[in-house]
Each structure stands twice: as C-alpha cells, then as structure tokens.
Amino acid sequence: MNEKILIVDDEKEIADLVELYLKNDGYNVYKFYNGMDALECLESEKMDLAILDVMLPDIDGFRICQKIREQYFYPIIMLTAKVEDVDKIMGLTIGADDYITKPFNPLEVVARVKTQLRRYVCYNKAAGIEKESVPITEYDINGLIINKNTHKCKLYGKSVTLTPIEFSILWYLCDNRGKVISSEELFENVWGEKFLDNNNTVMAHIGRLREKLKEPARNPKFIKTVWGVGYTIEE
C-alpha cells in the first residue's frame, strides 16, 4: 500500500492524529497546516486522495478542492467543524466525494479513506468495460462491512454480533442503499409474511441494530429514518 494521501488542516493536533493513523495503515502522507503550502506540493506531487479542512488561515478547502478538480479526479474528503447543510452541499457540488464533521473518530477517517480509494480503483478498472452481472456478496459503506457469504459484520474493523433477522435487515438496506425502504417492504422481504399496519417489529429491530452499530439517536450515520416513508442507508 503506497497510496499518497494529502492532509490539509490548520488544527495541528487533528492533522497529526490523522497522519499517525494513516501512516500506521501504510499510506504515504503529505501534511500541511495551510492551503498555500498544500497547493505548492500539488504542483509537484500526484496524490491518490486528499483530506481537506474547510476553514484554513489563508485559503479555504473549497478553493483547494476546485484547484484539484481542474486536473485530477482522485477522491476528496472534506473536514469541517460546521454542520450546516449548505457547506456540505457546496463541497459536494464542487467535486468533493465525502464529508466528515468534527469531532470524529480517527478510525472512521481511515475507513472512509479505504472506501473512497477502493471505489476509485474499481471505477477506473471498469471504465470502458461492459459491466458483468456478478452477484455482490459484500458491502463496505464508510467503514461498515457486511458479508453475505460469511454472515459477518464489522464496524471500523471490529466485529458486530447480529442475529439472523438483524443481519437480514441490514443486508437488505445495504443491498438497496440510496433507496428509502418502507417498514412494509422490509418486513415482507425479511420475515416473508404479510405486513400489518400496527406491526412495530421492524421499528424494534432497527432500534436494536442502531444500538449495536453505536448509532447516535438524533443523527445516525448509517440507518437513517425518512419520517413517514421508511429507512435508508446512503451510499
């Protein structure tokens, strides 16, 4: 593993911590505490992924993202202490691939890096090649890995013990990631029975799943509720 990772963050402690975790996983890290030094590095070094803080002392991460996108298509992950949707939308609009809000778990950053690099490599290999119909047996969604063959689930490298029903619910949501799945659809596909309007079984199992995934109740990272419609796992 020799991928080059660019880190730009004016908070030294955060930049140093992310660098440490990435180097421990074998990545080559180029770290900067301001945007101008990072841009100068980009003129001579071809990166494989960039991690950019939005707020920097000289130029912001959005401008660095734009400069990168003028020439390159490798993944860009934005870091921010803000939670406004407008910042997230702006970052994704100008070419960012992912967004992480501070404070965060460094293991989550490493997991996101691995996911983005894996997607980038797969997309490049698939470019110009007709896609074959191959059954998917594993999903890796931002550090949540679920394997249908082994019936195992991991979160940031640590095993998560699931019951067969919990595994089936999570697999169905992952297999339909990006779509909103109703309680009725989940129940009828997982339990194989007719759904009744007063059936709270799905809600109870979703609650237990979130507990095992250590999901914050108000802002879950994985299983999100679309009120009045159902549940979804975003890509």
Image: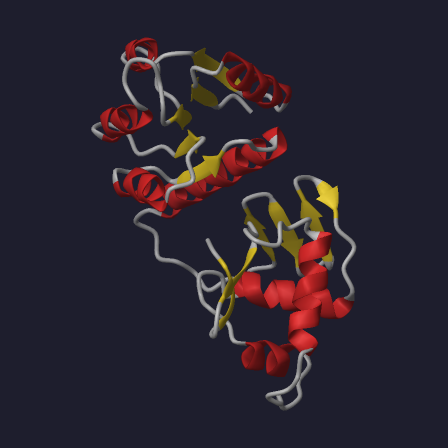
Q: Which colour scheme is used?
A: secondary structure
**Position of residue 71 measured from the top left corner of the image (x, y, whole percent):** 23, 27
- Residue 19 lies, with reference to residue 179, above or below; the image says above
Q: Residue at x 67, y 61 (%)?
A: 148
Q: Residue at x 41, y 35 (%)?
A: 82
Q: Is residue 86 left or right of residue 7?
A: left
Q: Quadrant of residue 56?
A: top left
Q: Residue at x 61, y 32 (%)?
A: 105
- Residue 20 lies, with reference to residue 219, above or below; the image says above
80 or 164: which is nearer to us? Answer: 80
**Position of residue 68 measured from the top left corner of the image (x, y, whole percent):** 27, 26
Q: Is residue 46 left or right of residue 108?
A: left
- Residue 142 lies, with reference to residue 33, above or below; the image says below
Q: Quadrant of residue 44?
A: top left
Q: In this view, does 49 lie to the left or right of 162?
A: left
91 or 4: which is nearer to us? Answer: 91
226 or 137: which is nearer to us? Answer: 226
**Which quarter of the figure is the N terminus placed in?**
top right
Q: Residue at x 46, y 64 (%)?
A: 133
- Residue 6 lies, with reference to residue 196, above or below; the image says above
**Position of residue 168 measured from the top left corner of the image (x, y, whole percent):** 67, 68
**Position of residue 40 measured from the top left corner of the image (x, y, whole percent):** 29, 9
Question: Does the image show residue 178?
Answer: yes
Q: In this view, does 224 lie to the left or right of 126?
A: right
Question: Does the image show residue 135?
Answer: no
